[in-house]
Image: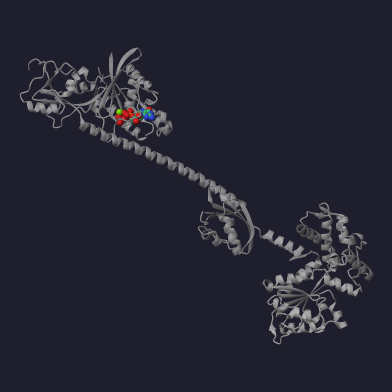
Amino acid sequence: MIQKKICMLGGFAVGKTSLVRRFVSNVFSDQYQTTIGVTVEKKCVTVASQEIMMVLWDLYGEDEFQHVRDLYLRGSSGYIVVMDGTRKDTLQTALALQQTAANTVGPVPFVSIINKADMRSEWEIDEHVIEQLRDRSWTVLFGSAKLGQGVDELFLNLATQMVQRPPLSNTHP
Amino acid sequence: MSSPPLHPVPSENPLPDRVLSSLDIAVFERNGMTGEFHLQGRAPEWWCARCGSEPRTVLDLDLWSPFLKDYLIADDPARNAEASVVEKSGPWTETDGQGATMTFEATVLCIESRTILLVECLGTGFEQMRAIVQRARERVLAETIASKTQRKTETRLINQLEASERTKDDALALLQHLGLAALVLDERGRITFASDHGLELLGFSAEEAIGREWEEVFLIEEQDRVMLRELIEAPPNGRIVGPLCMRKPNPSWVELGIHHDPRHPDRRILVVTDRTELHTLRRVLNEQSSFHDLVGKSPAMLRVYQLVRDVASVDTTVLIEGETGTGKELIARAIHSVSERRNKPFIAANCAGLTDSLLTSQLFGHKRGAFTGAVNDQQGLFEAADGGTLFLDEIGDIPPPVQTALLRVLQEKEITRLGEARPRKVNVRVLAATHHNLSEDVVRGSFRADLLYRIRVARIQLPPLRERREDIPLLAQSFLVTVCTAAAKTVDSLKPDALHRLMSYVWPGNVRELRSAIEFAVISCKGREVSTDDLPPEIVGASAVPDLSASVPLPEHDEKTRLLAALADAKGNRTEAARRLGISRATFYRRLIELHIQPR
Ligand SMILES: Nc1nc2c(ncn2[C@@H]2O[C@H](COP(=O)(O)OP(=O)(O)OP(=O)(O)O)[C@@H](O)[C@H]2O)c(=O)[nH]1
Ligand SMILES: [Mg+2]
């Protein structure tokens, strides 16, 4: 079975850990437990009749305390950029991290998600901005780790892209 | 290097081993041939816990997070060799069989071509660091939420403010457009808002009025102010007061609606309405149909009212002439109440049918013992009326000696009590009335000419009722109201035929007789309307004389019959008979004498 390294990128508290845990273990907690360092989880999926072992690197959130190290990104077959719809500043962090990832691992598939769709009325990221992201050929999905909405779709979307377009280099065995 | 030993190799130097192990650091060395990492020296506790029952010395990377493998296979195996900065792996978490997590950090060192791996289990220090970062991030999140809430509240308030500003502008525009004079008072009675028209009515600018207490800008009579204050301070329920006279900017009459502010029960909204025009119109109307207690709007009466106003302003003696029952005393009272003396006494005296001495003592007073029966010192009516007005009715009936005394009083402005020698100063305005033609009396020698001239400085002639028939409906209605109130009966009006009968009657007893007739009718009336049958028999029975000329006196024998009939009806009671005829008792007596009627 092929294994694919996937990094979860985004500002702190956007819901990276929550998305991974919802996807892998189908659990969610309202309690915030910030991630320091890296936790790696695995989940096997089948896309286009191919079984893939997704190796999910849940990285710590980017902020003034911790900057994501390029080292961690190496060997990724794809990555997920997470934003928190209720905090506009997480968009800037996402843009910067995507840039870093692109520079480090090259043009591998990635998907972005605006999380916390259950609090849509509180969202600060508006349609206009989302359109701008899509114009940059970002895949922008909406979801809620809390409700489990759009979570499987998120990971499967990336998995499909990775299967369809195997990266030229940096393939992680 | 030899093949890997099964058990950790005991170190030649046990102290550094012990140190590393107590720092929870496991030390491995890579076998250059197999590439496997072998545990060196003493193993820390966590290693044994992870390895389970069987202690191992080889690092099985498949049992570890891919993170560690990634770190170890990173392309430059010689890294950290000469580097001054040692690149550590950074922390990663491992989950044990029970689901508990541990955090590790690895460091690869190349020393003298040997590859050494240090794996440290991060403990308390790391947990403290994590707690600090956690708190800091939580704080940032809380602040984000707080500032967001604040921004939202701000936006909401701004929107609300804008909306209420708009509403206020609309309401204001409406107020101005309607020309409503409205004021808003805060809980302390200060003006917080005044519409343009309100300011105009008060005669103040917005700068002068806003923030001031209402009492400072409402320039009204003191008693009105007290009443208004009570109403404004009273528990809220809308009411309208007025009209009140406001002195500024021009004297005006206003009506005030006092309403409570529905949002603040302690605040008040005052709506001021200018009623000056209405008030003036009403006053003119009232003045025209009545004057003090005088009722009537016939041209003759309007002339009388004007005369009353004219003579009231000058402090002279006035002679009021008119037939019996025309209301001479009412004229005297009206003059008094319009004059400067209105707050001083008004005393009325009837001079008819009194003897010299009785009249003298009544007018001027007497000293004790001045005559039989004078048991006390007694002041006279002149003294009693000092500063005010003395009304002498039937002045034509004053006996000559008293005429002389009266003349002296009028000239000297002093009186002498009967039995006293010392004169007393008096300040009295004399109003006299008569139904006689005093000029004729002078010619006949029964009245002093000099007294007449002294009295008749000003002169008001009251028309008999038959000369102002158009006032009869007004008078009748006015009496109907007063009589009904006194008798607690409800009679609303007169039927047309009854009114017609009143209009065509000759009214020898004038207004007084009309009043008696209405009293009689109210008592007789069974319904709410007076019919002809309710009127006194002498009126019902009288032949209608619609165009009776004013000067035609009643035939003497007619009057004699009337007096006798009245006396018979009143069973000989002369006061009652006079009342029934609507004439004064004095007149009744006089007529009895003149017509040679000897009452039984
Ligand atoms: N309402 C809502 N809350 C969410 C959702 N996803 C995550 N959260 C909450 O957001 C907070 C942060 O979630 P995490 O999953 O720990 O975020 P993270 O990106 O891993 O954060 P770091 O590890 O600190 O970078 C937690 O309190 C979660 O319960 C969501 O979809 N809806
Ligand atoms: Mg996390």
Along the line of sight, which residue is nearer the eye, B545 or A40? B545
Across and down, in percent, residue A143 comes to 39, 26
Give the quarter of the image for residue B477.
Answer: bottom right
Query: How many numbered tags mark residues here?
Result: 0
> Which of the four quarters of the rendered structure image does ligand 1 lie in?
top left
Along the line of sight, which residue is nearer the eye, B466 or A40? B466
Residue B520 drawn above or below residue B343: above
Across and down, in percent, residue B162 comes to 49, 45
Task: State which quarter of the image contains the N terminus of chain A.
Answer: top left
User: Colour scheme in the image?
Assistant: one colour
Outermost residue to the left:
B12
Outermost residue to the top:
A49
Give the quarter of the image for residue B17.
Answer: top left
Task: State which quarter of the image contains the C terminus of chain A.
Answer: top left
Residue B22 drawn above or below residue B195: above
Residue B542 drawn above or below residue A51: below
Residue ID at (59%, 64%): B222
Along the line of sight, which residue is nearer the eye, A168 or B298? B298
Along the line of sight, which residue is nearer the eye, B478 or B170? B478
- Residue B139 shows in the view: yes
Give the quarter of the image for residue B563.
Answer: bottom right
Across and down, in percent, residue B251 comes to 63, 64
Across and down, in percent, residue B571 comes to 88, 65
Q: Is residue B51 left or right of residue A131?
A: left
Q: Is residue B553 left or right of residue B356?
A: right
- Residue A115 shows in the view: no
